[in-house]
Amino acid sequence: MKLRLNLFFCTLFLFAFHAAWADKGDTARGKKSAVTYSFTESMFAPNNIWAQNGWQSMHPTDTSLNNYEIYNTHYNLGNTGLPYVPVLFNTDLQPMGFYYGKDYISNNFYSDSSLRYFVTRAPYTQFYYVSDPQIHQYFRFTHAQNFGKHFNVAIGFKRIRSEGIYLNQGTNLNQLTVDMSYHTKNYLVFADVLYDVYKFQQNGGLASDTELASSDYSNRLTAPIKLNYASTAMYEQSFHLQQYYFLGYKPDDSLHKNPLFYISHSFKIAGHSNVFSDNNTADSLFFQSIPMRYSPITYDSLRYTEINNDLSIGSGKGWNNFLRWEAGVRDQWVYFRNYVSLYQNVEGIEEPYYTYNFTDTIFNNVIAHARVYNAYDSGRIIFDVSGQYIFAGNQQGDKQGLLQLGFKIDSTRFLKLSGSYSYQNVPFLYELYQGNNMDWLAHLPNTTTENINLTYYDKKWKLGITLQATRITNMAYFNSEAMPQQYQPGFTVYCAGITKDIRVYKFHWTTSEKLQYVGDSVPLKLPRLVTENSIFFETMLFHRALLMRLGADFYYNTAYTGYAYMPITDQYYLENSTKFGNYLYVDPFVSFRLKTFRIFIKFENATQGLVPYNYYYALHYPMPDRTIRFGITWDFWN
């Protein structure tokens, strides 16, 4: 580790020395930063009027220092790569059709909807690496290259590897992505392949939270934990293809810029597997309150394969200016199975002797969807209504609706009002789970969710305001025994948020404040206030060749009764005896940018030991102690 730190600081010195002799006009922002643009699939789709009217658009590759030192979610179970803790209320609609359950791991990795596609005039490569004196690595690699004007291929790799500071807390998460895009006047296609391997240890949390401040456990590896050998392994693979064919050009449209129609086809095949294993018989005490147990050794596995086909037709740019439309049908086929392997002791070695297949079934849904939309008054007013309905299949009768109205006040200010409605089956996990330690079978009524959201954004003043209210009836959740239950009365969650960038001379304050309110009797736990702030001093050095930021990031949420975590299902359940929050996380940092090379040094959780040891987001899972981390990023255009 000393060698790694020496190399790191030598590299920093060499680049700082080089900056001192750099040309004054050659700023860190460099001309090459505008060579490469990135976008998501939805931003470039021909039916995205929000992108075409300035609300979303392609953006140049980011080589700034904005939030550069924040490389991963702050809300987790105490180690980078462990499951995300739901501190903030999520208003996203549940996917239509088969949906297994909430996923708290893969939110930090790319999906089909968030994967970045590129347009670049020169081959582009980026390396991003974060480490610390312990075994902690965060690595991201991206390479994108155009072949001609219309065809681009990008390859990405992301890795999170961290041992953590407590026993059996390690993570090893990896994702490989390959995507391509191709477009002509008559054809547009996106394709991607994702391959994910997530492996993380499950220690069940500390045996007792009171031991955190004990001098006997100043070496965190000696602190007792609940599970010594448990772990989870997730494997995901998917191939996605989205293509558009443009037809019906008018005779006077010789350049084929305004087709009357497009035909859209989408195909996706994906596989998912999840294995929870624990080969230590002593860990059975952790599950003593759970009534089902087939074997002292646990190996619970579930797998499902999903195939989606969608065929749609829609109006193109040549359609009349009054209203545009799209309609289509999606077929979903899912093959689901889960099983448990039972073990026996053979000459002192536990070996599997029987695999019990609990579930082996197929889900099928046929989903109709439609949309009407348009932009009026040169794009100042945007109208967008869409809906989905499952008219055949296992989730027959499920439906969703979304209404969005946008108003561009001027070139810098935008106002958006949206409302949504959904009536859907609860996630499959709430209705069926069969394993070595846990077992349930329930038939729960559909959940109804209604949401209204008002968003205002001012680019000139760097101000964003969000107001929203969400009404939920028949909400499914996990009770204090980690078993599924449903809260049938309707209740409303109120949220308000504000983001603002303030600058005085060379001092900056970036703030994000979120207010959340839900009744105390409701089994949905949220802190009333969550605040994230970054305060820093920014200046140019070495003849304006080197940009430096010196400051600190602050995280705080009010005290609230939160959740406990169940390793077997990777889900959060109610915990009514302990309050979390009312702790200020302070992460001082310094960051630099020289041309397309960036570097930061961050001192995470600097307040640890100065205030009471109550830095938790979930029961028995403390956040990491005070530590130093550094990161480097280098962008290349070849």
Image: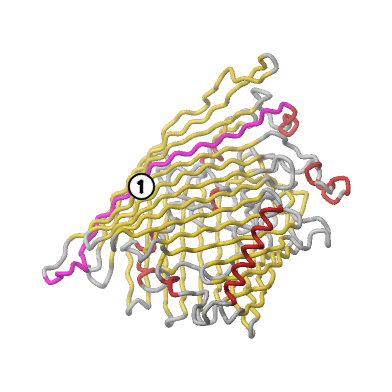
Establish if 477 lies above or below 598: above
Residue 69 included in the magenta stretch of the image: no
Q: How many marks?
A: 1
- In the figure, is residue 37 to the left or right of 73? left
Residue sitting nearer the eye, 550 or 67: 550
Res 550 → quadrant? bottom right
Q: Residue at x 41, y 50 (%)?
A: 178
Residue 208 position within the rendered picture, expressed as x and y whole percent measured from the top left: 81, 43
* Residue 610 seen: yes
- In the figure, is residue 389 to the left or right of 295? left
Establish if 606 lies above or below 331: below
Res 629 → quadrant? bottom right
The residue beneath circle 1 is 367
Residue 559 position within the rendered picture, expressed as x and y whole percent measured from the top left: 75, 60
Prevailing secondary structure class for the magenta stretch in the rendered image: strand
Q: Around disc 1, counting alpha carbons within 10 Å, would you say few (fewer than 14), some (14 to 19), or many (20 or more)?
A: many
Q: Which residues are magenta?
A: 252-281
Residue sitting nearer the eye, 587 or 408: 587
* Residue 523 seen: no
Residue 267 included in the magenta stretch of the image: yes
Q: Residue at x 54, y 27 (%)?
A: 339
As shown in the figure, which amino acid type bears the numbered disc 1?
A: Ile
Residue sitting nearer the eye, 292 or 556: 556
Residue 31 position within the rendered picture, expressed as x and y whole percent measured from the top left: 43, 75
Q: Secondary structure at mark 1?
A: strand
- In the figure, is residue 5 to the left or right of 247? right
Residue 8 position within the rendered picture, expressed as x and y whole percent measured from the top left: 64, 60
